Image: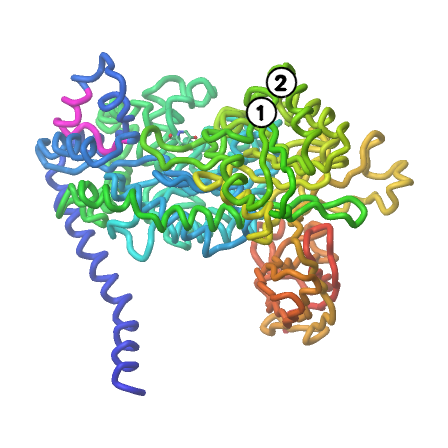
Amino acid sequence: MTMKKTTLALAAALLPLLAHAQDAQIESKVAALMKQMTVAEKVGQLHQISGRLVTGPTSSDYAATLADIRLGKVGSMLNVKGVADTRAIQALALQSRLHIPLLFGQDVIHGYHTVFPVPLGESASWDMEAIEQSAHIAAREAAAAGIHWTFAPMVDVARDPRWGRVMEGAGEDAFLGSAIARARVHGFQGKQLGATDSVMATAKHFAAYGAAVAGRDYNAVDMSNQQLFEVYLPPFKAALDAGAATFMNSFNTLNGIPATGNAFLQHDILKDSWNFKGFVVSDWGSVREMVPHGYASDLADASVKAINAGSDMDMESYAHIKHLEDAVKSGKVNMKTLDDAVQRILYKKFELGLFDDPYRYSVAAREKAVLADPSHRAAALDVAQKSLVLLKNGVAGAKPLPLSRAAQKIAVIGPLADARRDLEGGWVVEGDRAPVVSILEGIRSHAGKAEVSYAPACDTRCSGTEGFAEAVATASKADVVVLAVGETWDLSGEAKSRTDITLPGHQEQLFAALKATGKPIVVVMLAGRPLVFNTIAEQADAIVYAWFPGSEGGNAVANVLFGDYNPSAKLPITFPRSVGQIPLSYAQYNTGRPVTDEKNVVYKSAYIDSVNTPRYAFGHGLSYTDFKYSGLTVSSKEMSPSQQVTLSFDLANTGKAEGTEIVQLYLRDMVASVVRPVKELKGFQKIHLQAGEQRRVSFTIDRELLSFFNSQLVWGAEAGDFKLMVGSASDDIRLEGAVKLLPSK
Ligand code: NOJ
């Protein structure tokens, strides 16, 4: 070993020891501080309030709130941002008896100043580096503006596109969702918590919020433990393993018990079984909401039930600040329980370095420089183009995309063609944000010799048809039409559940009017969720699903339309044909009466008015080139539980353009003590190939990959046959193989 290598090896060996020593140091500082604290001061640390009271529009509570901060009755605030405001408010907290700094939290969901695609959109990139980078830039910008903590990532698996919050997550799959949860936590928190280009992450909403009955936000959730452990918890566990500093609980009940008052979730699973050392923040008002749920008799009872169940910080319920001191005095809450919650929070304040320098995140020069960093826009463009899904390109061989830049006429039409706010999507911070490039603007600047005309046709919700005639006239003079339609930004997100997920207003009618011109129509669709658009799916010449692509959205769309970027994204969530099919996932069960022939479904598990298959399946997404899969081998037909097998195949780019394919590995456990889904994603790789290039691709299959939770919720693999499938989408399996897992000896 060289000298340098020895030193490096030594340093690596010392790191855990150093971390351990640092933990111990912080623990003793926390303990020393706790000794000085009154019960009221401890309770103050659990109280989180919104800064809109003090930095937003003036409110009657203004003076009282400022006084509370000075008295140490507030531990954390959300919605205070920017160096000037965070400094001013922190200064008040430092006037409190023990000078304990505040934690500033904010919903930094997909960017701060520079807006990145909405999380569901980014998830379509299946690109962990790009996703991590996006989260890291969001953290860098937020941390430069005085923020210590983001309420992200949302890692709720969601299989119901009626639920507006599908937009905020990673889609329907536990495996993909876990990978994305890890990437986002790493991105937000960076290499080390406390670095001033990182913020604390929050894995939310714990748990099962994505399964609200009928897709109605805040609704109850009723689910087997099997489903909970198999589908809904894995991304949380992945976030925790990646080091997520905090968790947020959720509004919903789970099997009758509100998540905020749920000891099974917060104590048994999170803090005991998973050994989570950070703290749990409630969702906004979710402690108080245990009263209307019918679980707590009043706010005082709600405070007791929340803290005893493991919910540490109270966001905006004012339950602990009003009642917890009394509850401790009367013995309804043990001092030990209170101390545990407070310690968890103080620990993070020390870890962030706030006791050493309470203003370390609030430095004006850094804020100015970081928010103006041009590399952030470049990264936003990169991930946006990686997120755009080419759903369809051509009918019977003719492929309208990519568009030519030669002298031709392109008509850009539609209510969202020149929209800016709608490209950002929901959950962006108020105030100063990076300028947005609209789709029209992007197309104009990329069009070369092509001539671009424009007609909006209607307002952004397409509430009237008055502009249709002009739009049709514009289309009639063109060689090709680019039609930008979809949802406006405010139709998905929190409290934006819809029973009808077709295109709002008269947009389908607009499509029909343009189609009647006989011109090729390329549809660009914006949305925060899978929409239902059957006529367009059948009749459009090409469709690009753009989600809400962020500040650089227009340039990303133009790059894809003109072929400067060859699309590679794949759907992270199933697109149904109708609301009636929901919930719909590729990971369905076979049933005792599976449909084997769509023409004969009598007494099969089917509908009499629709096929079972989705409009677009999980994992679907096209490219401008073609990929051929061949030569699958599995290194052994059998494996013992301690062995591994390698599945390999050749992937060739048989088209004319370089491109990236996201190859997907699925498996099915054929017979098990708990029935397994017909397909489960168990691996994916993003492979870039030049035209004509071929590469051998391999996946390793071990016992862990074959494991599941049995009916006793014990994780493990059962001996027997496994079907292995690789392909380009969950409904486009190109090669199959098998392996038999032998019993343990
Ligand atoms: C309610 C939302 O459910 C949660 O995700 C968010 O972090 C909080 N409000 C704070 O804005």
Which residue reaches farthest bottom? 1
Residue 542 placement (x, y as % from top left): 69, 41
The answer to whether mark 2 and mark 1 are in CB contact below 8 A is yes
Which residue is rendered at x = 16% and y = 35% of the image? 87
> Of 117 and 438, which appears nearest the observer?
438
- The residue identified by callout 1 is 456
Residue 602 placement (x, y as % from top left): 90, 36
Which residue is rendered at x = 32% and y = 57% of the image? 191
Quadrant of the snapshot with the C terminus: bottom right
Helix, strand or loop under label 1: loop
Eyeballing the image, is 102 above or below 126?
A: above
**Amino acid on which the number 2 mark rests in the picture:** Gly
Quadrant of the snapshot with the N terminus: bottom left
**Amino acid on which the number 1 mark rests in the picture:** Pro
Decide whether residue 73 is among the magenta residues: yes
Q: Quadrant of residue 636?
A: bottom right
Which residue is rendered at x = 54% and y = 34% of the image? 528
- The residue identified by callout 2 is 467
Q: Quadrant of residue 642?
A: bottom right
State the CA–CA distance, disc 2 to disc 1.
Answer: 7 Å
Q: How is the image coloured?
A: rainbow
Decide whether residue 712 is among the magenta residues: no
